[in-house]
Image: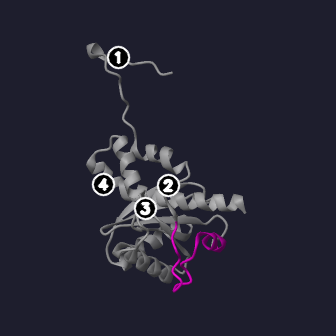
């Protein structure tokens, strides 16, 4: 049981400032992510597959790159080689696909990425709007450009959940803006990794 730490006459308990990324890793990335589920693969592009097919196509030790696609930014997260834990990586300013692809190509080469998990922003009623169309188009472009398998993952509530965690961790509005996209990507990727682990143990 923790004792109270008094500061001067006011007797206020000292509150060490928490690192928002550490808080997210503890609260979300080490647990199963419940709200997310696999999105329906696009039957028109063979490289867009379900999670089990994605895993079957990955070389041993290949990492997965998680992507949270926004209108102005692209949040990126990376799995470990054992595909157990997702970690926030970086946030790109979204531009033309060719420019985004150059940075993603560098990450693929440096980190040994073998496939992608892209968040699909499905509406709460399960319908798909313009943002889903944009995510599917981005996924098709990735699959065609790199020749690597892509899985889509229902990302409902991911950004909201990450934002709540950052607020709880006392992150400033500016700091939240810097972190939310790559953390949302990690939340999405972790959900996919957890599902793969669960389906593997069940099979």
Question: What stretch of residues is rendered in magenta?
Answer: 38-57
The answer for how far apart the CA atoms under marks 4 and 3 are is: 19 Å
Left/right of residue 194 with respect to residue 124 in the rendered view: right
Could you say which disc has been placed on residue 156 in the image?
A: 3
Q: Nearer the viewer, residue 12 or 8?
A: 12
Left/right of residue 131 with respect to residue 54 in the rendered view: left
Quadrant containing the C terminus in the rendered view: bottom right
Q: Is residue 151 above or below residue 36?
A: below
Residue with the most extreme top position: 9
Q: Which circle, 4 or 3, is nearer the viewer?
A: 3
Disc 3 packing (10 Å; few <14; some 14–19; many ≥20): some
- The quadrant in which residue 67 appears is bottom left
Tell me which residue sits at (41%, 80%) in the image.
137
Say whether disc 1 or disc 3 marks the residue closer to the N-terminus. Answer: 1
Residue of label 4 = 177
The answer for how far apart the CA atoms under marks 1 and 4 are is: 34 Å
Residue of label 2 = 87
Say whether disc 2 or disc 3 marks the residue closer to the N-terminus. Answer: 2
């Amino acid at each position: 049981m923790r004792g109270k730490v008094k500061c001067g006459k006011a007797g206020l308990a000292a509150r060490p400032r928490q690192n928002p990324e550490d808080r997210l890793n503890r609260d979300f990335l080490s647990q199963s992510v419940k709200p997310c589920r696999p999105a329906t693969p696009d039957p028109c592009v063979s490289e867009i597959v379900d999670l089990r097919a994605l895993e079957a196509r990955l070389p041993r030790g290949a990492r997965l790159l998680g992507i949270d696609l926004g209108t102005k930014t692209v949040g990126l997260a990376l799995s470990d080689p054992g595909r157990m834990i997702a970690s926030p990586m970086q946030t790109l300013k979204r531009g033309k696909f060719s420019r985004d692809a150059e940075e993603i190509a560098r990450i693929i080469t440096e980190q040994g990425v073998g496939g992608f998990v892209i968040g699909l922003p499905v509406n709460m009623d399960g319908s798909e709007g313009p943002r889903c169309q944009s995510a599917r188009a981005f996924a098709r472009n990735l699959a065609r450009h790199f020749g690597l398998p892509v899985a889509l993952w229902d990302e409902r509530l991911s950004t909201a959940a990450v934002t709540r965690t950052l607020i709880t961790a006392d992150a400033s509005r500016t700091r939240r803006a810097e972190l939310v996209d790559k953390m949302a990507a990690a939340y999405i990727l972790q959900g996919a990794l957890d599902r793969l682990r669960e389906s593997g143990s069940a099979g």
